[in-house]
Image (cartoon, grey):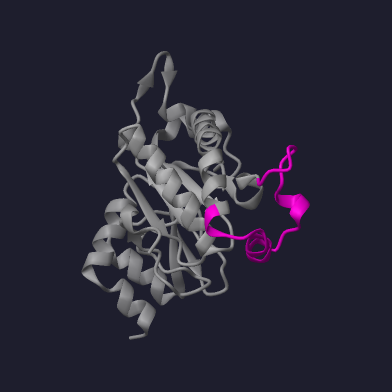
């Protein structure tokens, strides 16, 4: 048995992937970093092992949850996808190729969520150089005024991300300046000075790191899945241990 198959044969890993994948699209990612067929789901541990025997290294899933993920189709109109969606997680994807810089963003974002009394979230290492923060669908109401929250995935998630960025920008800038010299920032980001400054010639945290806003049927690496590029596990961590 090879190490990948041995890892995915663990009962605790199988149990987590099956529970986390409930109501989601779950797609295998192979050695050549190509994705398996879509739509697809995981229903049993045999489904996991079957994909691994075909060469799967990782499993990616949708942030959205659906009444029947297998009813999704390529090119399906947004309105049809909205009808199938029963909920969604907010995934805060810190897009930067520096784990040391990513720690700052992850720390501030987690603290910001806790200020609003949000405890139902997970932060996980991506298995490469950054983090994903997942605010679970259970944190959101089904209705907000006249808005149907499950059907308004794109609109609401975009507004939350923009609100998060607006309210954390100054704190992130302050910590970047505290932890890194300007030379270090330029070396770590591989950017020029003009590329990281705002109009007032101050460091712009969101020119250093991008916070991706997921589109319809966007997939992200599942917690406890192996990163298909680095072969490291995308493992959840305690928010208090981010800087360590």
Where is residue 96? Give x, y as percent: 58, 57
Residue lying at the far left of the rendered structure: 11
Where is residue 140? Give x, y as percent: 35, 30
Instruction: Tell whether 175 sits left or right of 41.
Output: right
User: Which residue occupies 62% across, 60% down?
Assistant: 181
Residue 170 among magenta residues: no
The answer to which quarter of the image holds residue 66 is top left
Residue lying at the far bottom of the rendered structure: 1
Instruction: Tell whether 167 sits left or right of 225.
Output: right
Where is residue 203? Give x, y as percent: 66, 47
Number of marks: 0
Height in image: 65 above or below 148? below
Residue lying at the far top of the rendered structure: 146
Residue 194 among magenta residues: yes
Nearer-the-camera pick, 127 or 142 = 127
Where is residue 17? Give x, y as percent: 31, 59
Can I make out residue 79 in this image? yes
User: Which residue occupies 33% across, 59% down?
Assistant: 241
Span colored in magenta: 178-203
Can I make out residue 63 in this image? no
User: Which residue occupies 53% across, 44% down?
Assistant: 73
Nearer-the-camera pick, 178 or 59 = 178
Tell me the quarter of the image containing the N terminus.
bottom left
Nearer-the-camera pick, 184 or 147 = 184
Tell me the quarter of the image containing the C terminus.
bottom left
């Amino acid at each position: 048995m090879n190490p990948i198959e041995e890892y995915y044969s663990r009962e605790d890993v199988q149990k987590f992937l099956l529970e986390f994948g409930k109501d989601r699209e779950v797609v295998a990612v192979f050695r050549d970093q190509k994705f398996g067929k879509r739509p697809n789901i995981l229903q049993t541990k045999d489904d996991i092992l079957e994909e691994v025997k075909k060469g799967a290294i990782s499993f990616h899933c949708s942030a959205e949850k659906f009444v029947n993920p297998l009813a999704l189709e390529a090119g399906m109109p947004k309105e049809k996808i909205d009808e199938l969606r029963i909920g969604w997680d907010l995934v805060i994807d810190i897009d930067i190729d520096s784990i040391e810089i990513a720690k700052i963003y992850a720390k501030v974002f987690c603290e910001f969520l806790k200020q609003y009394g949000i405890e139902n979230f997970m932060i996980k290492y991506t298995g490469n150089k950054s983090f994903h923060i997942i605010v679970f669908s259970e944190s959101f109401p089904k209705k907000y005024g006249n808005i149907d929250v499950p059907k308004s995935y794109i609109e609401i998630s975009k507004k939350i991300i923009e609100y998060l960025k607006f309210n954390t920008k100054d704190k992130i800038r302050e910590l970047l300046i505290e932890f890194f010299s300007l030379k270090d920032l330029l070396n770590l980001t591989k950017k020029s000075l003009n590329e990281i400054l705002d109009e007032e010639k101050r460091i712009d945290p969101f020119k250093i790191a991008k916070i991706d806003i997921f589109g319809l049927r966007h997939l992200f690496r599942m917690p406890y899945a192996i990163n298909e590029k680095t072969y490291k596990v995308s493992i959840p961590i305690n928010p208090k241990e981010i800087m360590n």
